Image (cartoon, rainbow, N blue to C red):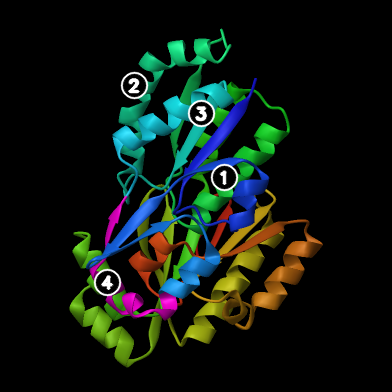
């Protein structure tokens, strides 16, 4: 059985990884004033965006995920021919409309694929499953890597489906948001009142950096640390401790809202990288996608992994 994988462009993995493993992308388009940019997981394009005048207006951006019709067209024109079963792994449905759009599109796809496959010489059924990763950014990347491992390992669709749905419950993303004013402006535009004006002003004045945690579609602060370097060191050390205690997949994902050289210069990074090597954990590093960058701001740092329930220490 030919099994394919589709993700949206908020999934933070290196751009070359998508091509190497034949992952299909559902791009998200970012609109800022009269400018529009499509997030195709091009790290250099994302960095050019950061350095342009457009980035200064990022808090006012609008994002447009693939519509129901666009998803239908992608599947019916290509994927129902290339594959027999497709997993569509989306960013958390609590943060984006992509899951709902893909789910709605799936009904029409499954009703209309037969003559298209028959014309291509395939007389077997086609199936697809939309899976909510229940996570964001580097967290979604962890689940995507596991999907690739299972597909390339020859596992059947039922086992892959059960594994991904279970893994989604145990995937964690921890993020440092360096600019609270930006984060507040962005969350308010999305209708989220979780960052108040007072906390943003106070945090910025005192150089307080929150560490946010996303799991099962819910996001909240788990620590507030003075100074970006101290916060990064604390986060890297915590991730290292989870590695020592054992992860549920041999994968740890990092994404950063800027040049990766800046992330690699942060205290604690090198210790985490060395530790992952020693424990045979594959560490993926990527510039945060344009979609994520617009939503959380320049300089954000995210660490994603899968682990049993735990408390940030």
Which stretch did the figure color magenta?
50-64
Instruction: Using residue 206 as the reference point, say whether residue 223 is left or right of it.
Output: right
Q: Is residue 86 left or right of residue 58?
A: right
Residue occupied by mark 4: 59
Does 152 appear above or below 179? above
**Few, some or many C-alpha atoms within 10 Å of disc 3 (few <14, some 14-19, many ≥20)?**
many
Measure the alpha-carbon separation of dots 3 and 2: 15 Å
Q: CA distance from mark 4 to mark 3?
A: 35 Å
Question: Quick one: SS at disc 3?
Answer: helix
Which quarter of the figure has residue 182? bottom left
Q: Nearer the viewer, residue 1 or 223?
A: 1
Q: Name the residue tied to disc 3.
A: 79
Label 1–label 4 contact, CB within 8 A: no
In this rendering, which labeled residue sits more in front, label 1 or label 4? 4
Nearer to the camera, 101 or 166: 101
Quadrant of the image occupied by residue 266: bottom right
Dot 1 or dot 4, earlier in sequence: 4
Q: CA distance from mark 2 to mark 4?
A: 35 Å
Task: Report the disc number at residue 144.
Answer: 1
Residue found at the far bottom of this picture: 205
| Pointer 3 or 2: first along the chain | 3
Structural distance between the alpha carbons of marks 1 and 4 = 28 Å
Identify the mark nearer the N-term, 4 or 3. Answer: 4
Residue nearer the viewer, 214 or 89: 89
Q: Which residue is mark 2?
A: 107
Quadrant that contains the N terminus: top right
Q: Is residue 152 magenta?
A: no
């Amino acid at each position: 059985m030919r099994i394919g994988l589709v993700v949206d462009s908020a999934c933070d993995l290196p751009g070359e990884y998508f091509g190497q493993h034949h992952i299909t992308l559902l791009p998200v388009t970012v609109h800022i004033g009269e400018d529009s940019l499509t997030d195709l997981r091009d790290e250099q394009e994302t960095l050019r965006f950061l350095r342009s005048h457009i980035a200064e207006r990022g808090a006012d951006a609008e994002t447009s995920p693939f519509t129901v019709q666009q998803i239908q067209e992608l599947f019916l024109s290509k994927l129902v021919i290339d594959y027999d079963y497709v997993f569509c792994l989306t960013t958390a449905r609590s943060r984006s409309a992509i899951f709902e759009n893909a789910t709605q599109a799936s009904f029409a796809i499954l009703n209309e694929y037969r003559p298209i496959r028959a014309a291509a010489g395939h007389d077997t059924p086609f199936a697809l499953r939309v899976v909510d990763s229940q996570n964001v950014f580097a967290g979604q990347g962890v689940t995507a890597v596991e999907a690739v491992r299972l597909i390339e390992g020859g596992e059947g669709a039922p086992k892959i489906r059960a594994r991904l749905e279970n893994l989604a419950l145990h995937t964690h993303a921890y993020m440092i948001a360096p600019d609270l004013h930006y984060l507040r402006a962005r969350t308010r535009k999305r209708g989220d009142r979780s960052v108040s004006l007072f906390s943003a002003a106070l945090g910025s004045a005192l150089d307080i950096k929150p560490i946010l945690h996303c799991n099962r579609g819910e996001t909240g602060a788990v620590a507030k640390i003075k100074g970006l370097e101290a916060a990064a060191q604390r986060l890297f050390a915590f991730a290292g401790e989870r590695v020592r205690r054992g992860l549920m997949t041999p994968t740890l994902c990092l994404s950063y809202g800027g040049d990766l050289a800046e992330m690699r210069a942060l205290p604690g990074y090198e210790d985490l990288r060395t530790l992952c090597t020693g424990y045979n954990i594959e560490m993926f590093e990527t510039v945060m996608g344009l979609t994520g960058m617009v939503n959380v701001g320049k300089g954000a740092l995210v660490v994603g992994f899968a682990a049993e329930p735990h408390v940030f220490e």
